[in-house]
């Protein structure tokens, strides 16, 4: 252990492990500092490693307690959540009445009474429709029997598996005949069948049983109504209490509550519009087809679509069953099925994307998982409220740093920017997906390849430089080089450069590493696309052997790209050698590794370059004038107003 001996470490040495050391960031950091990695685990290091695990375990325990509380407290929490959900819908109406000059208490009473009247009228209408339909159902019994009889005959007809079934029956009978018969002594006695008859209830007991069955839903509805009234009356006080519970950051808490309220209100309003636009065409279509109770089924379809995923199937089952019972043939069933499929396609692919947009901010997978989770906790009511409740969790995760993982898990916004996504695909060896992401981004930029290089390509190379000496393994570096080479080849093939002009091309060189060569290729491609011929040399530019093979006698401009953070010494040395060898060459240093500490003019003079640029866009602007090309075609000129002189 030479490092220990140099430090004067006279203590006993641990046996050296002959196995290859793992390429971890800590080991590389210790080696880079001049000291070998130590195998002794100090108390502070062990404590630091234990704290994240302890926090994770505490978080799991808290999450389990919260889920258990939601499950066992559903008797109170479900009405309260429904009341908050209804308050989001009714609060705009109350606010509108208040703006008209009505006090809050009469406004709340008027809105609640209007809601109860609408629900009562709807219930009476649906009850009358259901009563009339139930009176007509006995007349359809003969049609149902005929169809079931015909279906039974079709099922009993010879099918594709009848031969296999007969063969299996024959083999089974042969096996049973070959088995020895049981003797009478060993035969088990016959088991006597016992049937339990339920007790006959008196009319009074039947009435009490019916009341107990309906008392639960009515009790829940009463609790919801009471909660809604008090939430609407004490809305300001409740908001103040929630702001106090949120914490000291009043700005963040206010933004969170406003965003949650806006998202939920907008979502519920849009869902109401979607359901209405689905229920009205459903009722009209069923009426034209001839299905009885068309208005009833249209209303049921509009209401059941509030239940995610399962509601449309439940609503479609009733008109299909009735069409099966009414028509002796199959035309009515097929027309009803076609109407339902058409409305579902239009609603799911046209109406919902147009109205919903990004009203919730939830991803499709999080919606499905949330619906399953809340349905498992609270049943059908949880399924209905799954989206608003998940929206609240998303907003909490967005504004509360301790729960930021909720936004990552539930949100629809990409959690990785475009350069990071492409860089990760290259590290994973998935060059095809990196190319697909790049072409998609270029299409979004309307084919502006230079803009893609500046916004995405160069940041990818910067991340590669930052990870080169810290966490990147040789395998990762090889994947990056191969993937980036394939990516640039694909982009150069898809976006070919125009025919070169008579002028000499600009020579683009990489400063030292492979990433510098890739940056030089990007620069050459971008210059060529902007009608400034350029050529990227894949040779390095640091050694004398490489300089001898450059052949820059007929070249006017040479652009050297560096992505290292501090390449000043190497850049100064290279500029001297290039000027000594080819004095007529204009040198442009493209230092894309970071912002320099001193002004660009001073730094350019110190390094001996004719121009210096810190970004790809600035490099394009610096190279074109030195080459004698015009940059007017590369940029859209700013419009000059007619009164520009008077304005100035």
Image (tube, helix red, strand yellow):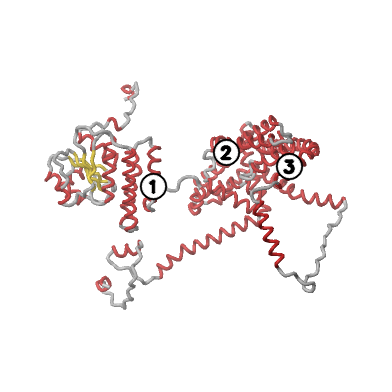
* SS for dot 1: helix
Q: Could you say which is closer to the camera, residue 184 or residue 507? A: 184
Q: CA distance from mark 2 to mark 3?
A: 36 Å
User: What residue is pinned by disc 2?
Assistant: 348
Q: Residue at x 37, y 53 (%)?
A: 427
Q: CA distance from mark 2 to mark 1?
A: 32 Å
**Whole-percent x, y for residue 438 in the image:** 38, 43
Q: Residue furthest bottom?
A: 12
**Whole-percent x, y for residue 581 in the image:** 12, 45
- Residue 490, image quadrant: top left
The N terminus appears in which quarter of the rendering? bottom left
* SS for dot 3: helix
**Whole-percent x, y for residue 68 in the image:** 62, 58
Residue 372, relative to residue 449: is it above or below? below
User: What residue is pinned by disc 3?
Assistant: 150
User: What residue is pinned by disc 1?
Assistant: 432
* 2 or 1: mark nearer the eye: 1
- Residue 505, image quadrant: top left
Dot 2, crowdedness within 10 Å: few (<14), some or many (≥20)? few
């Amino acid at each position: 252990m030479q490092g220990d001996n140099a430090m004067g470490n006279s203590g006993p040495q641990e046996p050296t492990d002959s196995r290859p050391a793992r390429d971890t960031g800590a080991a590389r950091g210790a080696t880079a500092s001049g000291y070998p990695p130590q195998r002794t685990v100090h108390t502070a290091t062990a404590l630091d490693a234990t704290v994240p695990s302890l926090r994770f375990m505490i978080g799991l325990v808290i999450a389990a307690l919260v889920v258990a509380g939601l499950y066992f407290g559903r008797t109170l929490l479900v009405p309260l959540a429904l009341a908050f959900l209804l308050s989001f819908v009714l609060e705009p109406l109350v606010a509108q009445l208040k703006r008209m000059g009505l006090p809050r208490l009469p406004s709340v009473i008027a809105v609640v009474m209007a809601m109860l009247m609408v629900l009562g009228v709807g219930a009476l209408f649906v009850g009358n429709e259901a009563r009339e339909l139930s009176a007509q159902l006995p007349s359809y019994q003969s049609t149902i029997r005929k169809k079931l009889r015909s279906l039974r005959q079709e099922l009993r007809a010879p099918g594709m598996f009848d031969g296999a079934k007969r063969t299996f029956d024959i083999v089974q009978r042969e096996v049973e005949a070959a088995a020895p018969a049981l003797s009478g002594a060993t035969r088990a006695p016959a088991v006597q069948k016992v049937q339990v008859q339920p007790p006959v209830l008196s009319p009074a007991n039947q009435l009490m049983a019916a009341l107990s069955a309906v008392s639960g839903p009515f009790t829940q509805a009463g609790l919801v109504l009471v909660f809604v009234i008090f939430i609407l009356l004490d809305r300001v006080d409740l908001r103040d209490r929630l702001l106090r519970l949120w914490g000291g950051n009043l700005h963040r808490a206010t933004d969170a509550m406003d965003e949650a309220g806006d998202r939920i209100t907008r979502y519920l309003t849009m869902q109401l519009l979607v359901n209405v636009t689905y229920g009205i065409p459903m009722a009209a279509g069923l009426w034209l087809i001839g299905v009885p109770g068309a208005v009833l089924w249209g209303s049921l379809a509009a209401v059941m679509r509030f239940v995610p995923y399962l509601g449309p199937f439940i609503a479609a089952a009733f008109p299909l069953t009735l069409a099966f019972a009414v028509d002796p043939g199959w035309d009515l069933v097929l027309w009803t099925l076609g109407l339902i499929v058409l409305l579902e396609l239009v609603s799911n692919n046209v109406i919902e994307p147009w109205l919903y947009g990004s009203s919730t901010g939830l991803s499709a997978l999080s919606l499905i998982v949330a619906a399953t989770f809340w349905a498992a906790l609270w049943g059908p009511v949880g399924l209905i409220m799954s989206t608003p409740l998940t929206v609240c969790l998303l907003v909490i995760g967005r504004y509360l740093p301790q729960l930021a993982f909720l936004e990552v898990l539930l949100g629809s916004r990409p959690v990785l920017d475009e350069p990071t996504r492409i860089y990760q695909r290259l590290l994973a060896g998935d060059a095809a997906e990196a190319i697909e992401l790049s072409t998609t981004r270029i299409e979004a930029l309307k084919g502006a390849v230079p803009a893609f290089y500046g916004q995405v390509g160069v940041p990818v190379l910067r991340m590669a430089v930052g990870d080169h000496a810290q966490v990147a393994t040789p395998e990762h570096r090889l994947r990056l080089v191969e993937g980036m080479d394939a990516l640039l080849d694909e982009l150069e093939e898809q976006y070919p450069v125009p025919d070169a002009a008579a002028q000499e091309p600009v020579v683009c060189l990489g400063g030292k590493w492979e990433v510098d060569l890739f940056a030089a290729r990007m620069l050459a491609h971008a210059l060529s696309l902007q009608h400034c011929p350029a050529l990227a040399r894949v040779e390095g530019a640091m050694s004398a052997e490489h300089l001898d093979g450059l052949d820059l006698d007929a070249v006017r401009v040479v652009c050297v790209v560096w992505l290292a953070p501090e390449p000043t010494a190497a850049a100064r040395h290279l500029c001297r050698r290039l000027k000594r060898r080819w004095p007529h060459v204009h040198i442009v240093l493209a230092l894309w590794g970071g912002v320099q500490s001193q002004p660009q003019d001073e730094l350019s003079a110190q390094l001996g370059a004719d121009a210096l640029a810190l970004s790809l866009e600035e490099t394009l602007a610096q190279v074109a004038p030195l080459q004698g090309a015009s940059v007017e075609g590369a940029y859209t000129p700013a419009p000059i107003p007619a009164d520009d002189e008077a304005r100035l």
